[in-house]
Amino acid sequence: MLVVFGGISIANPALFSASKADVLSSTGRIQYVFYNSCIIGMVFGALSGWKKSRLVIILSCLGLMLTLYIGHRSSVAIAILACLYIRYRNISLLLIRKRYIIGGIGAFFFLAVYKAVYAAIKAGNFELVGQKIQFDQLSDSALVGLEQFVTLAHLDLVVKYDYTLPCSNLWLVPLSLFPFSDTVFGKDGCTYNEQVQPFLFPGYSGGVAANIWAEFFANFGYAGFPLLVVILSLVCVAVEAIIRNVRSATLKAGLIVAIVHLTFYIQRKELLGAFISAKRAVLVALFIFGLVYVHRKCFPPASAEVMPQGARALRRDNG
């Protein structure tokens, strides 16, 4: 899958355009499958053991590098966070070694700066890249790449103006769990971003993402904050329960990526978008699992393991 869908993506010249609009317009389901496959491949390697999954990890890393070049930093960030989730899910944060913290901050800083220079890299304008990564320009380049400041502005402005959404697409969240539901029901014109950007960011030329906390405030007022915490907590507890009872490292990988979408990456999204992203990761994992299941039925291994190593390792972590 990494090779096939990666090859199809490489054959799409629009993905290598320096224009973000061209990249987004040419990004389809094949690309989403490829991006999620790269992330799941990395997480699968972390669960199954790096030594036994070298080829998958190498291909996944190459795929993530390609994804980063195309301009999607989120895939790299989600893969890193999912691997950290596996490593530190049952370890106190106080026990994390300093060098790992420094490495994490370095990776975060790199992804922030990369947003300011990736278009110039794709355009071959390395002189501009050199200017933006000079020491006196690094802070400005990092601020450009930190979407968090824009997403925080959402909550600030929504609370300041006591803004209320004219309509909401939250009723589509349960339906988003079904495959291809986003195509069937569409956006229905009630997305948070479509309503908020013209009103709160009328002079902003680029995209302004969203803010999950601002969305719930705009729908339910201050009661939206505890309501969101309850919803996400219940969903993540349910996903964790499934993870503990699933034997397949592939399915575990997809579910772990879904948790990252519903906890970390949801901060710059609305609830419907986060659920759709999480669903895509799980569906890709299910598709991979189905291919492996059919392959094993047609070509049974010489000696079958009762439980995959990844499942045993995660079960040991759970005590």
Image (spheres, rainbow, N blue to C red):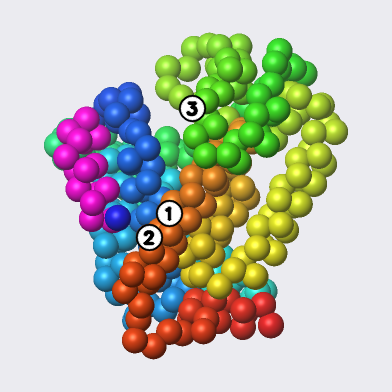
Please state which of residues 84 and 316 is positioned toward the viewer in this rendering.
316
- Mark 1 → mark 3, Cα distance in angstroms: 19 Å
Number of labels in the image equals 3
Specify which label sits upstream in the sequence, 2 or 3: 3
Q: Mark 1 highlights which residue?
A: 287
Quarter-of-image position of residue 91 = bottom right
Disc 2 crowd, CA 10 A, few/some/many (<14, 14-19, 20+): few
Magenta segment's dominant SS is helix
Residue type, mark 3 in image: Thr
Assign the N terminus to one quadrant of the image. Answer: bottom left
Residue 193 position within the rendered picture, expressed as x and y whole percent measured from the top left: 57, 22
Q: How dense is the environment of label 3, judged by Cα within 10 Å: few (below 14), some, or many (20 and up)? A: few
Residue at 27% in and 67% down = 58
Visible residue check, residue 40: no
Report the residue marked by disc 3.
183
Residue bounds of the magenta highlight: 2-17
Left or right for 242, reference 229: left
Q: Where is residue 25 in the image (x, y as percent from the top left)?
A: 33, 25
Q: Is residue 9 magenta?
A: yes
Kind of residue at disc 1: Phe
Residue at 43%, 59% in the rendered image: 290
Q: Name the residue under label 2.
A: 291
The answer to whether residue 226 is above or below residue 79 is above
Question: Which residue occupies the extreme front position in the image?
Answer: 298
Mark 1–mark 2 CB contact (< 8 Å) = yes
Between residue 294 and residue 134, name the one nearer to us. 294
Helix or strand or loop: what does disc 3 sit on? helix
Task: Characterize the local packing of mark 1: few (<14), some (14-19) or many (20 or more) Cα atoms within 10 angstroms.
Answer: some
| 244 over 120 or under it: above or below | below
Q: Can residue 249 be seen in this view?
A: yes
